[in-house]
Amino acid sequence: MEDIETPDLASFLKHVQETFLPDRRGAWVFRGVSNQSYQLLPSIGRMEGTSDTFEKLEKSITDMFKRNAIPHLDSLPPNEWEWLALAQHHGLPTRLMDWSVNPLVALYFAVIGSPDADAAVYALNAERRISDEKVRSLSPTSIDKLYKFWPAVVTSRIAAQDGLFTVHPEPTRPLNEALREDWVLRRIIIPKGSKKTFRYLLFRYGIDESKLFPDLMGLCMHLSWQHQVKTPDVFVGGRDDA
């Protein structure tokens, strides 16, 4: 896996523009992690459950979500893939992993946490998404290889974050160890000392909680941050206020 370090937003944007943007939109997808040592595991692959086996854990948590989510839904997802997408974007551990076609969205998630650790933005070249035919004929739990999945059920968060997923046949195995032969994975390192400046500049470019989580919770998260942050020393020759 190829690594490059970008200590400021200008170098990050330059690298993204030269390396990834020449390809069509969606050929490269992006994921941010606040600690570059974190493994690329789906959330359920990181979970220590009370069930005897991983299979029982996954079935139990998914079945309970489907039963109890119904009163909160205007319409039901049409298949198992869409149920998982819905569950994942509301915080349930699943075998899906979140990505975005927007590298700045991934960068936001990389710089908002773990202030004492270098962050990373992963770029994944995975040309083909899973076909509609496979979605109709396969269960997410029966796949034998990694797939890129664009959900049809679009929540406001998925839309705001330009979101999609990878679906993992072995959720306890890191993606970089299970990478398909026709997929390419690269990593951009963000130094821990640059995180606050990156986050502030993203806010000034319109990437913040109120945009990525378009509800009252997201708005409150953003207002709380905005009223505590100090303007970083990136505006040479003049004063700028948040």
Image: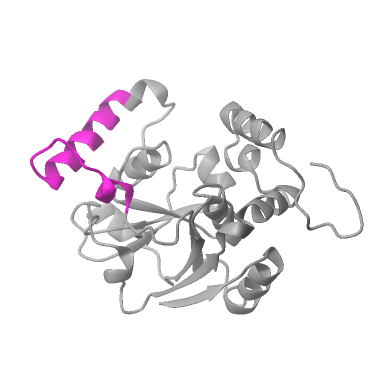
Closer-to-camera residue (32/194): 194
| Quadrant of the image occupied by residue 170 | bottom left
Location of residue 9 with respect to 3 vertically, above or below? above
Q: Tell me, yes or no, whether the highlighted magenta stretch contains residue 64.
A: yes
**Residue at the (58%, 52%) spot, across then down:** 108
Query: Quick one: which residue is furthest to the right in this view?
Result: 237
Residue 154 screen position, x and y as percent: 49, 43
Question: Over which residues does the magenta segment extend?
Answer: 42-68
| Quadrant of the image occupied by residue 13 | bottom right
Query: Quick one: which residue is furthest to the top in this view?
Result: 71
**Residue at the (44%, 61%) spot, across then down:** 36
Residue 77 screen position, x and y as percent: 36, 38
Residue 78 visible to an observer of this rendering: no
Location of residue 223 with respect to 128 vertically, above or below? above
Location of residue 193 with respect to 115 vertically, above or below? below
**Residue at the (66%, 48%) spot, across then down:** 207
> Quadrant location of the N terminus?
bottom left
Residue 149 screen position, x and y as percent: 39, 57
Residue 69 visible to an observer of this rendering: yes
Location of residue 70 with respect to 194 vertically, above or below? above
Residue 90 screen position, x and y as percent: 42, 36
Colour scheme shown: one colour
- Residue 2 in the figure: left or right of residue 201: left
Magenta: main secondary structure equals: helix
